[in-house]
Amino acid sequence: MKRAFVKRSWLGAALVVAVLSTGCASGPNANPKDPLEPMNRSISRFNDSLDENVLKPVATSYQDVTPDLVQKGVRNVFNNLSDIWSAVNNGLQLKGRDTAESLMRSVVNTVFGIYGIFDVATPIGLERHSEDFGQTLGVWGVPNGPYVVLPLFGPSTLRDTAGMPVDTSADFVRNLDHIPTRNSAMTLRIVDKRANLLGTSNLLSEAAIDKYSFTRDAYLQYRRNQVFDGNPPDEEDLPDPSAEPAVPSAK
Amino acid sequence: MNRFLSRRTWSTLTLSFVFALGMGGAVSASEEPADAFIKRVSSDILDAIKSDKSIHNGDVNKIIVLVDQRVMPNVNFLRMTASASAQVGAKPAEQQKRLQEEFKILLVRTYSGALGQVSDQTIAVKPLRAAADDKEVLVRTEVRGKGDPIQLDYRVEKTADGAWKVYNMNVMGIWLVENYKTQFAQEINAKGVDGLIASLADRNKTNARASK
């Protein structure tokens, strides 16, 4: 198990290095946050077509066929499992109260919510504080690095990609010994996640002029917001250009 | 004693005067705090959606009408468009108008699509951190429903006539104007402002077809 994990991380590291050395093509309008844009775009296309042909249809029928109550139970169980890892990361970020609340949540939901099928912690005021290792790195000042689109996994950054093996190694589902159970649980988790995002992904393709850069900018803002727990400092003032008198521009 | 009485009378008078002023202010929109404004507008639209059966059956066009009537008057759309396309500075009035028109159709539609997924959600406004005389305020809210609460923040400005108007908003930390800034810049760099307007119009046509 451990060997396999080490092997996988080496493979990941090798992939990142290979990608960094080949993908640094930059056009005249290259975005400094996205030096790997040409490569990212082609991986996005691959992911999109996989999603369109496999994942989205499966998730849609899962949503149509499964009763709401069952879907909710499934989601709660996976959330409960991730709360434990959130507690660890809250601890690493030295957030005492959030650590305690996340721990309490998993205890309460596991015991009184029957292995997390029912979320009884939220109604009694224990809210979720989702944290992963990428966020922990961000809190301690590790910069994003370039934006990366991973095959199958989708949008990420170099920092978040580096955090992923740590998240995976602590993942309860992935560490299940009974392989068929593990594989079905992992599949169910992916389908549940995708079903959850059905509404959002439809909106995204309606709102964007260029879906790739829209997703990228949204992801980067979203992660920054998560690192600052919903309260990031202003990057720049937002002046009101419409208030200025209309002067013909120099261009 | 006499002096005491007169002083008390005087202070009562002053108090009631201040009170009357305060009452008057509370009624006029100009003294409405920013968080109360957001609470009022969002509750209004949520209630309208929850009470309409045909909206639950996925009638996006009906929501679009609702959003146009109830939400858009509270948005400074001029400022939103100008911020998103700030890189080109001032544009000819006619071009600016067309850009604004297409951008508005796009946003109203996506916003309506999001509202179409509303079922039992409520809005909780977080405590406001702003001075009473601030002209630009950040109002933070949370949409509470089935899953985890969704962060939804608004930047509002006080207009000359004292009413509040929204000029930017974020969902889960994603600011709308910032996200469209890159979208606009990309199109403008490749095809110019007219090219951007054409792309927006194209997107709107595709979206309109999808809802039929």
Image: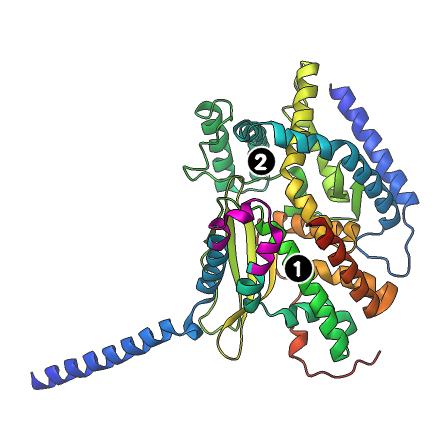
Q: Is residue B63 magenta?
A: yes
Residue in the picture at 62% in, 47% down: A226
Residue in the picture at 81% in, 43% down: A44
Chief secondary structure of the magenta portion: helix
Q: CA distance from mark 1 to mark 2?
A: 35 Å
* Amino acid type, label 2: Ser
* Amino acid type, label 1: Leu
Is residue B22 in sight in this rendering?
yes
Total number of numbered discs in the rendering: 2
Q: Is residue A106 magenta?
A: no
Residue numbers of the magenta segment: B48-65
Front residue of this view, candidates A110 and A163: A110
Q: Which residue is mark 1?
A: B107
In the rendered image, the vertical position of residue B17 relative to residue A176, given as above or below: below
In the rendered image, the vertical position of residue A161 relative to residue B135, given as above or below: above
The circle on residue A187 is: none
Give the quarter of the figure containing the C terminus of chain A.
Answer: bottom right
Residue in the picture at 54% in, 48% down: B54
Front residue of this view, candidates B8 and A3: B8
Is residue A141 in sight in this rendering?
no
In the rendered image, the vertical position of residue A93 relative to residue A80, given as above or below: below
The circle on residue A86 is: 2
Which of the 4 quarters of the picture holds residue B188?
A: bottom right
- Where residue A84 sits: x, y (%)? 56, 30
* Mark 1 crowdedness (10 Å alpha carbons): few <14, some 14-19, many ≥20: some
